[in-house]
């Protein structure tokens, strides 16, 4: 049950990152710098998706190792 809960939490994090990326693509004038305004929102959304996928992969490896040890 704990494993299922962890997987659901990671999937929610990934979905949150995708939503941030989609919301960040609204047609607003682009700011001049990379870390200002919507560019920062998109970068954070992409980072959240990547970290979520990495966490899901690491968790899958840990689950696999635990099952082999049983």
Image: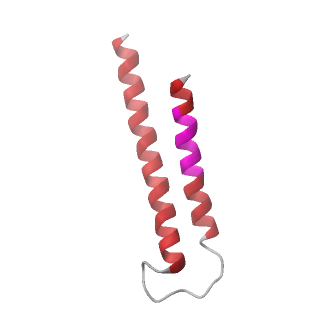
Residue 1 is situated, as x and y percent measured from the top left of the image, at: 56, 22
What residue do we see at 54% from left, 48% from top? 13
Whether residue 48 is situated above or below residue 64 in the rendered picture: below
- In the displayed structure, 58 sits above or below 46; it is above
Residue at image position (47%, 48%) is 52
Q: Main secondary structure of the magenta part?
A: helix
Which picture quadrant has residue 16? bottom right
Say above or below: 69 vs 17: above
The answer to if 17 sits in the magenta stretch is: no
Quadrant in which the C terminus appears: top left
* Number of marks present in the image shown: 0
Task: Please state the extent of the stretch shown in magenta in the rendering.
Answer: 6-15
State the image coordinates of residue 34 (x, y, percent, origin top left): 42, 80
Residue drawn where x is 59% and y is 71% of the image: 24
Q: Is residue 67 left or right of residue 23?
A: left
Q: Is residue 14 above or below residue 63?
A: below
Where residue 18 sits, quadrant-wise, is: bottom right
Q: How is the image coloured?
A: secondary structure
Q: Residue at x 46, y 68 (%)?
A: 43
Say left or right for 35 vs 30.
left
Q: Position of residue 49 (x, y in %)?
A: 49, 54
Q: Is residue 69 left or right of residue 20?
A: left
């Amino acid at each position: 049950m704990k494993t299922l809960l962890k997987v659901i939490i990671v999937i929610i994090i990934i979905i949150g990152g995708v939503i941030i990326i989609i919301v960040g693509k609204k047609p607003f004038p682009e700011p001049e710098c990379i870390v200002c305004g919507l560019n920062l929102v998109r970068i954070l959304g992409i980072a959240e998706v990547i970290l979520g996928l990495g966490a899901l992969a690491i968790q899958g490896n840990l689950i696999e190792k635990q099952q082999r040890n049983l």
